[in-house]
Amino acid sequence: MTPASRQALEGLRDLTTLKWYVIPLLACIFYIYTLEMKKARATGNWNVVFAGLTVFGMDFINETWNGWVLVFTGRSAFWTAPGETALRTMVGWNIEIMFMFAISGIIYANTISEDRNEKILGIPNWWFWAIGYSGFCVFVEVLLNMGGHLVWEYPFWHRTFKGVWLIFLFGYLHFYVAALLVIGMRTYRAKVITVASLYGIAIVANIFGIGVMGWTY
């Protein structure tokens, strides 16, 4: 097991590491969602809320399979976040990352045009912003990697041309693609079922891995 993996496992889900700044950050997340829910009740359009929940649900799944990689390889996950944090929830996930992804879908949904056919530089705006935000996330992740806050072990998931494209496609783009697909669905029921399924997959996978098999990731 790599040094970064061993370090990421230290204090995993240890509530004694919690910091007070988590409380106001959590309050900000609640404020953002309650504000969007208030708007949704007034307009009947819940797409912003669905987008927020979708992106976070996709990240929940991503971090789950990333932890499974550590378990199956016995060496490292694709990415680990071994640095200081108020709470490390998985080897590649911490409370600060969770807060960011909790609102990133809301940011995306508030950026796109209500007219999905509107184009920017010849690209449908929903896709343009999905690509744009994914690219920005990769840029930030590269900076975090350079600073040693986010560690990549495998050569195919690294700061190479092919590696960056892999991170772009499977680290971020599919989050926003999932969001645009969900908010593009015609019925409220379909959106609810899809979003609930994302969380169902992640929860069941973690119950099996952590609760049943006793895996640590």
Image: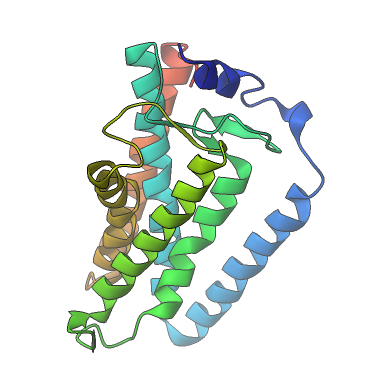
Left or right: residue 60 versus residue 122 is right
When asked about the image quadrant of residue 111, the answer is bottom left
Whole-percent x and y of residue 134?
35, 60
The quadrant of the rendering that contains the N terminus is top left
Q: Is residue 174 above or below residue 31?
A: above
Q: Look at 71% across and 56% down and name the residue there.
A: 25
Q: Which x, y percent locates residue 179?
A: 32, 63
Q: Is residue 46 visible?
A: no
Residue reaching furthest right? 20
* Residue 74 percent coordinates (x, y): 38, 11
Q: Residue at x 29, y 42 (%)?
A: 160
In the picture, measured across the screen, residue 47 lies left or right of residue 115, that is right
Can I make out residue 130 in this image?
yes
| Residue sitting nearer the eye, 29 or 128 | 128
Does residue 193 appear left or right of residue 67 in this picture?
left
Q: Residue at x 36, y 28 (%)?
A: 205
126 w.r.t. 74: above or below? below
Colour pattern: rainbow
The image shows a total of numbered marks equal to 0
Q: Is residue 68 above or below residue 26?
A: above
| Residue at figure coordinates x 49%, y 33% from the top left | 92
| x and y, in percent, of residue 39 in the image | 53, 81
Residue 92, compared with residue 195, is above or below; it is above
Q: Quadrant of residue 124?
A: bottom left
- 3 or 95, which is in the foreground? 3
* Left or right: 35 in relation to 135: right
